[in-house]
């Protein structure tokens, strides 16, 4: 049974009430993260905006009707990830690994990782494993069709010797890592008898500010033209994430838009590259990610991730709701 056959025109109306559930959305202060958070809140979930910029998070949450909460999370700093996860005592029904950066200049996280690999993959890898003892429903990771052009260079995961160029190769590798993470996480969940499932989604071409981290005038201009001609809005761009979070799907499923070569349209199950479906590569990446972050499956409450430099950042919490 595939979603393409049985849910050809999926809409958020199919999502049941999430009353009493907690949903965490990373990067919920804009784009598809904000639109997904808006729907979760409308379905009566308590939505955690896990954001680096708390002011922007508060401004975004003020536009949402429902129960929301702002918590600091900097995925570019493992100590911040640890602090965020360390305060959890109650269940999390859905974790949406949504935050990301796209084609910035070559940069490093607080722990020395290449920025895109560090934020898009390693930060979410650590966060998921640290929160896993509290997750009761689903882990959704936002990937990209750009993964199809990627390979994982295990000899230089963090771009110390390779030519970085405009950063597109780093972005593609990080998005392939998102799908491999989902694949191996699902295998481990099944192996440990967990009821939690892991899914992934991509938004197609959506009108968001993801390209704002690029400093390439050519790429920025190209992106603006492409968005104007082909993109769907952020509301529709969020629907594959919501589909992957709420629809009755097999573990390891990958959702994306159904039309215009997965650039737009209602969400369905979509395919992935052969590399993204390779369990050997997925297991190898998981091992490398454990070594880089110091976080393992399942994450012990007493674990501390590896730290190479930079000051620790605690989680500063601001709680509130809008109506």
Image (cartoon, grey):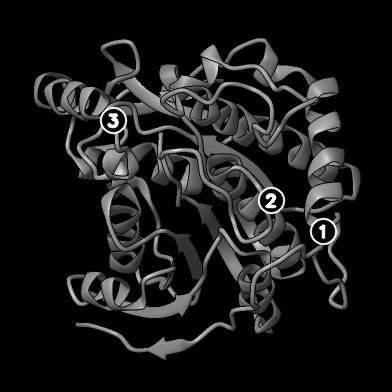
Report how far apart the C-alphas of labels 2 and 3 lie in the structure: 29 Å
Res 251 visible: no
**Classed neighbour count for the residue bearing mark 2: other residues with Cα under 10 Å, few (<14), some (14–19), many (≥20):** many
Q: Kindly state the secondary structure of the residue where label 1 is placed.
A: loop
Q: Quadrant of residue 102?
A: top left
Compared with 42, 139 (above or below) is above
Residue at screen point 45% across, 47% down: 100
Q: Earlier in the sequence, mark 1 or mark 2?
A: 2
The label shown at residue 295 is 1
The label shown at residue 125 is 2
Q: Which residue is more in the foreground, 299 or 155?
A: 155
Give the residue at mark 3: 216
Q: Quadrant of residue 80?
A: bottom right
Left or right: 50, with 292 as reference point: left
Q: Earlier in the sequence, mark 1 or mark 3?
A: 3
Q: Kindly state the secondary structure of the residue where label 2 is placed.
A: helix
């Amino acid at each position: 049974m595939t979603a393409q056959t049985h849910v050809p025109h999926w809409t958020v109306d199919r999502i049941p009430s999430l009353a009493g559930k907690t949903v965490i959305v990373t990067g919920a202060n804009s784009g598809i993260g904000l639109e997904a958070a808006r729907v979760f809140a409308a379905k009566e979930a308590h939505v955690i905006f896990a954001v680096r910029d708390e002011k922007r998070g508060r401004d975004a949450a003020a536009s949402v009707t429902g129960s929301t909460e702002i918590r600091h999370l900097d995925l570019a700093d493992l100590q911040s990830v640890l602090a965020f996860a360390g305060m959890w005592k109650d269940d999390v029904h859905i974790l949406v690994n949504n935050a990301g950066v796209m084609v910035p200049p070559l940069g490093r996280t607080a722990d020395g990782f290449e920025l895109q690999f560090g934020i898009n993959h390693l930060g979410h890898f650590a966060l998921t494993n640290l929160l896993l003892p509290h997750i009761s429903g689903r882990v959704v990771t936002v990937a990209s069709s750009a993964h199809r052009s990627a390979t994982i260079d295990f000899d230089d995961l963090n771009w110390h010797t390779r030519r970085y160029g405009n950063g597109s190769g780093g972005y593609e590798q990080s998005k392939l890592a998102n799908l491999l993470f989902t694949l191996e996480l699902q295998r481990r969940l099944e192996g440990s008898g967990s009821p939690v499932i892991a899914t992934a989604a991509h938004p197609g071409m959506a009108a968001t500010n993801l390209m704002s981290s690029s400093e390439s005038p050519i790429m920025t201009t190209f992106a603006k033209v492409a968005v104007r001609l082909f993109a769907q809005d952020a509301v529709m761009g969020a629907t594959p994430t919501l589909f992957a979070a709420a629809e009755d799907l097999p573990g390891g499923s990958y959702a994306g838009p159904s039309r215009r070569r997965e650039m737009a349209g209602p969400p369905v199950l979509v395919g992935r590259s052969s590399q993204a479906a390779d369990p050997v590569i997925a297991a190898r990446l998981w091992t490398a990610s454990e070594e880089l972050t110091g976080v393992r499956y399942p994450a012990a409450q007493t674990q501390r991730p590896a730290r190479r430099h930079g000051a620790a950042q605690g989680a500063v919490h601001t709680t509130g709701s809008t109506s």
